Amino acid sequence: MGGKQQITTHWLRHTTLKWVERNFGFAVARAYAGHTTGKSEGSTVIYTLASLEEVASALATLTGEPHPLAAAA
């Protein structure tokens, strides 16, 4: 095979969060990442909150496994 793949845990997290954001929106990706509202994020971020159900749905879709907190499809 070839050389080093350059895959790190940070790369995996970034890639996963990008996928969640593209498929479920910024608010869900933000909550999925466990980020909290901070002054540096701007005031509009306060209005884009995701519910626990939305985050659970993103996780269920990503893994292909049901999640008890996700909305029934």
Image (cartoon, rainbow, N blue to C red):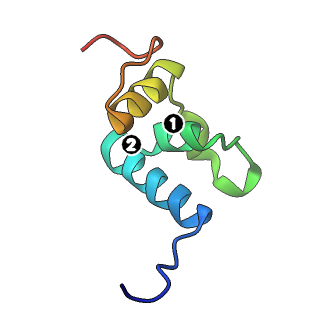
**Residue 72 in the image, given as x and y percentages of width and height:** 30, 10
Near-viewer residue (10 or 45): 10
Distance of label 1 from label 2 (alpha carbons): 9 Å
Is residue 63 placed above or below 68 in the rendered structure?
below
Residue at the spot of label 1 = 48
26 shown above or below 71: below
Of pointers 1 and 2, the one earlier in the residue sequence: 2
Q: Residues within 10 Å of mark 1 (few under 14, many from 20)?
A: few
Residue 30: quadrant of the picture: top right
Q: Which residue is mark 2?
A: 25
Farthest-out residue, bottom: 3
Q: Residue at x 55, y 56 (%)?
A: 13
Q: Is 13 situated left or right of 19 in this image? A: right
Secondary structure state at the residue bearing disc 1: loop
**What is the x, y in percent for residue 57?**
39, 25
Q: Quadrant of the C terminus?
A: top left
| Labels 1 and 2 touching (C-beta < 8 A) | yes
Residue type at mark 1: give it: Thr
Q: Which amino acid type corresponds to the residue marked 2 in the rendered image?
A: Gly
